[in-house]
Amino acid sequence: MTNPLLSIQNLTIDYVGETADFRAVDDVSFDVAQGEIFGLAGESGCGKSTIAFAISRLHKPPALIRSGRILLEGRDVLDLDQAALRSFRWREVAMVFQSAMNSLNPVLRVEAQFHDVLRTHLGLTRTQARERTAEMLRLVDIPPDRMRDYPHQFSGGMRQRIVIAICLALNPKIVVMDEPTTALDVVVQREILQRINELRRTFGFSVLFITHDLGLMVQFCDRIGIMLAGKLVEQNSAGNIYAQPQHDYTRKLWASFPSLHSADLMKVAAS
Amino acid sequence: MGTLVRSLIRNRKALVGMIIISVIVLIAVAAPLLTEYNPAARVGRPHQPPSAEHWLGTTRIGQDVFSRLIHGARTSLAVGFGAGLLITALGTALGIIAGYRGGKTDEVISFFTNMVLVVPNLPLLLVLAAFIGQASPLVIAVILGFTSWAWGARVTRAETLSVKHKDFIKSAEMMGEPRWRIMTFEIFPNLISIVGINFIGSVIFAIITEATLEFLGLGDPKTVSWGMMLYNAQKASALSVGAWWDILTPCFALALLGIGLSLLNFAVDEIANPRLRTGNRLSRWTTLIRTGEGRL
Amino acid sequence: MVFLLRRLGFYLAAFIAAATINFFLPRLMPGDPIEIMFSSAGAELSMENLAALKLTFGFVDGPLWQQYLTYLQSIFTGDLGRSIKYFPLPVTSVLGHALVWTIGLMGTATIISFTLGTFLGILAAWRRGSVFDIVVSVGAIFATSVPAVVTSLIVLFFFGFTLGWFPTGYAADPALDPAFTLTYIGSLLYHGVLPMVTLCTVLTGGFAVTMRNNMINLLGEDYIVMARAKGLSDSRVMLWYAARNALLPTVSSLAIAIGTILGGSLVTEVVYNYPGLGNILYQAILARDYPVIQGQLLIMTIAMLVANFIVDVSYVLLDPRLRGA
C-alpha cells in the first residue's frame, strides 16, 4: 500500500511477569488506508485489544512494547513526548470502547464530556463548545437540548452514539473501535454500525474495527486481519476472508459459525 | 484454604504481621516463666525508673511494669480473639442468612444492622459498662461481641448476594440440599476472605475498645491488662511526674499489637482483592524500561 | 427527596432504639433500678427533686408500657433529667455546653483529615507502587492501627511534656476570660494543636486507605481509559474522572466512620483534659452520674444521626444518579 494512513510495523508487546513475560502481540504488521475500514478479528485474549490500546499508547504497566513502530501518516507514535502525545490523542486517533454503558463518566453532564475535549484541544470556551456539541449530537440523532443530561438518563444505544459523537468532535483521522457493540442488542448493534459507515463516507476517516464476531465484521469491513495467540495469521479483503480463507484457523472460525447467516454473508461477499 | 496460607506467607506485610503477633502470643503464654514478679503485688518502691531489677520500672504503687506488661498481654489477646470470634461469628451468620434467605428475613436483619450502625458504638458501650459497674475482661468481651457485629453482617450480606446466584448454588438447590447445608458448606467457604478480614478487624477493634473502656475507668481494678495499666498510670499522673515508663509501656505494646494485626489485615485484603496488589512485577517492568529493552 | 425522607424516618427509629436501651438498662440490672440510678446522689437530693427525677426517667406507678411512654415523653420534650454530680444543672445544659467543644474539635479534625487523607489516597493510587504510595500505605497502617488513647498519650508525652512546645491540657489558658479577643482565640488555637494533631493522625490514614482502594478499583473502568484517550491532562483525568467517582464510596464509608471518630474524640478529650463531652463523661463515669451517662448516649446518637444525614445529603449532591430518584 502506498502511503497508508496507519502503519503498524513488526509490533511486539509483552505483559511483564515476575519472572517470565507473556507475549500478547507478536511481530504484527498491517496497514490501514485513508477512509478504509480495517477489521481485526480473533478470540478474546488474542492481543487485538492490546494493539488498539497501543495505537494511542494507552496501555499501562505491566504492558511493555518490545519492538516495532506505529506510524500515523509516517510519524512514529512511540516517539511522541508526553505533550505531543496528549495533543495527538483524540485529535488524530479517537476510540470507542467495549462497554457502551461504561464509557461515559457517570457524574459529569454529557456537555462537560464534550467540553473537556474541545477545551483541551481547541481551546473553545463553554459557549463555543456548546455549539459544537449540539452539532455533533445532531449527527447521531440525539436532541441537542439533552446535552445537560447525565449519562444514566440515556439508553445503552444512545450512550454509544454519544461516544461516537465525542469521537468525531475533533475530526480524527482514524477511529479505533474495540468491540464497540458487544454490550448492545443486535438491532442497536446494526443501527450503530450503519451510522458509523454513513459518517465515514461524510467525513472520510478510517476505522480500525475490532471484534470477535467475524460474521459482523465481514459485512462491515473492507479488509480483515485474523489474529491467533498474538500473531496476525492472515489478512485479506473481506470477501476473500469469507470466500477463500487461507489459514486453518480462519477456516475453523467459519466452521464454528452457525450456517444461519451464510446466505446473507454470501451476498455481502459477492457485492 | 491452602492457597490462602501460601499467599499469606509470600506477602511481606503478612509475614511481618504474623511475626509480631507470634512473638506477643509466645511472650503471653510464657509470661510466668519470664518473670518472677507477681503482676498484682507490690514488689518495689513506687515509680522506680527502669533498672536491672525492674526492667521497665515500677508503677505508682510499686508493681513491676514488665511483669504487668507480659501478663497483661494475655488479657488483651484473650479479649481480642474471644470478642473477635464472637463478633465475626454473629456478623457472618446474620449476613449469610439475610443475604441468602432474602425477603422479610433480610429486611428485618438489615434494618437492625443499619440501626446498630448509626447508634454510636463507644457511647453505647459506656452506658452498658457503666450499669454493669466494674466490668471484667470477660464481660467486656461479651458486650463487645453482642454490640459490634453490624459492620461484619453488612459486608457479609453484600458478598453473599454476589455468590448466591452462582451456578454451583443453583445446582445444590436443584439437588434438594437443605438451606442450612447450602449456607454452611456452599456459601460460607466462598466468603472466607471477607470473614478473615472481618475477624482480624474485629480483633483489632476489640483490643482497642477494651483498652479504651478500661482507660475511661469502667474496668475492674483487679484486672491485669494493658487498658488498666493505662488507667492506673493516667490516674497516677505518670506523665506529669515524669514516670514515662509507666504509661509508655502499655502504649507501645498496644501500638505494636495493633500494627501487627493491621499488617495481616491489609495483606488478606490484598490477597482477596487482586487489584490492590503491587507485586514484584512492577519493579521488573521499571528495570526493563530503564535498560531500554522496551517502552510504554 | 423520597430517599432523604426515608432516611429521616429511619433516623427517628434509631433514636428511639437508643432511648429504649436507656430505659431498659437500669430495669434489667439486678436490684432496685431507682437505687441504681440515683444512689450516688447521697443526701443532697431532696425528696422533691428525687420525685422529679423519677418522673423524668419513667419511674411512675403503673405498667411498664406506661413507664416507657412517660420516659419517651420526657425525652421528646427535651428533658433529660438533672446531673447528679453537677446538681441541680440539667443534663442538657451540662452536655450542651460540652458538645460545642467536642463538635469544634471533632468537626475541624474530621474536615482536615478527610481532605488530607483523600488527597493522599488519590495521589497514592495514581502513582501506584511508587515510593510515595508505599510511604502513604505503610504510614496509614501504622496510624490507623494504634488506638486513639495511645496516640494521644504518645503525642502528649513528646510534644507536651518532653519538648514542652504545647500546653498539656485545657482548651485555653484558664487564667483568661473567654472573650472574642485575639489573645483568647490565640490561646484556644495554641491549646487545640495537640488534640488536633492527635485526631488527625488517627483519622487521616483511614481516609487515605479508603480513597486509595476505591481509586484503584476504579482505574480500570472504561470511562477512565476513555478520558486518557481523549488526551486530557493527567490532573483532569485523575481529579474529574477517577477521584470524582471514587469519592462516592469514600463518602459513604465516612458515615460508618463517624462512630469511630466520635470515640477517638472522646478519648482524646480525656487525655488532654479538654472540656468536651469526653471529659464530662469521664467525670460522670467516675461519679456514677447515670443521668449524664444516659444523656450522652442520646446526645451522641443525635450528633451521629445529624452527621449521617449530612453525609446522605452530600451523597445525593455528589451522585447525579440519585438526584432524580
Image (cartoon, grey):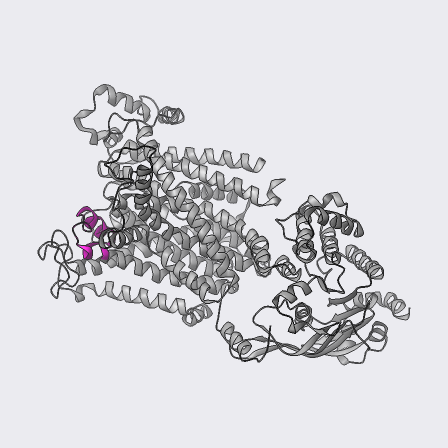
Give the side of residue C150 with respect to residue A209, left or right.
left
Q: Residue furthest top?
A: C48
Q: Quadrant of residue A234?
A: bottom right
- In the figure, A74 relative to B271: above or below? below
Query: Which one is nearer the viewer's eye here, B66 or A57?
Result: A57
Q: Which residue lies at the image location 28% right of the left edge and 24% below the top edge?
A: C53
Q: Residue furthest right?
A: A271
Q: Residue furthest left?
A: B45
**Range of magenta residues:** B225-248
Q: Quadrant of residue B50?
A: bottom left
Count of marks, rendered view: 0
Q: Which residue lies at the image location 27% right of the left edge and 29% below the top edge?
A: C83
Taking the magenta stretch, the answer to whether it contains residue B238 is yes
Q: Position of residue A15 (x, y in %)?
A: 59, 74
Give the side of residue A228 with respect to residue B88, left or right.
right
Q: Position of residue B232 (x, y in %)?
A: 19, 49
Query: Which one is nearer the viewer's eye here, B246 or B295?
Result: B295
The quadrant the C terminus of chain C occupies is top right
Q: What is the magenta segment's predominant secondary structure? A: helix
Query: Which one is nearer the viewer's eye here, A251 or C176?
Result: C176
Give the side of residue C54 with respect to residue B44, left or right.
right
Residue B85, can we see it?
A: no
The quadrant the N terminus of chain C occupies is top right
Give the side of residue A17 with respect to residue B214, left or right.
right
Q: Which residue lies at the image location 27% right of the left edge and 59% below the top edge?
A: B252
Q: Position of residue B112 (x, y in %)?
A: 45, 41
Q: Position of residue B127 (x, y in %)?
A: 31, 39
- In the figure, A33 relative to B293: above or below? above
Q: Quadrant of residue A101?
A: bottom right
Residue B1, can we see it?
A: yes
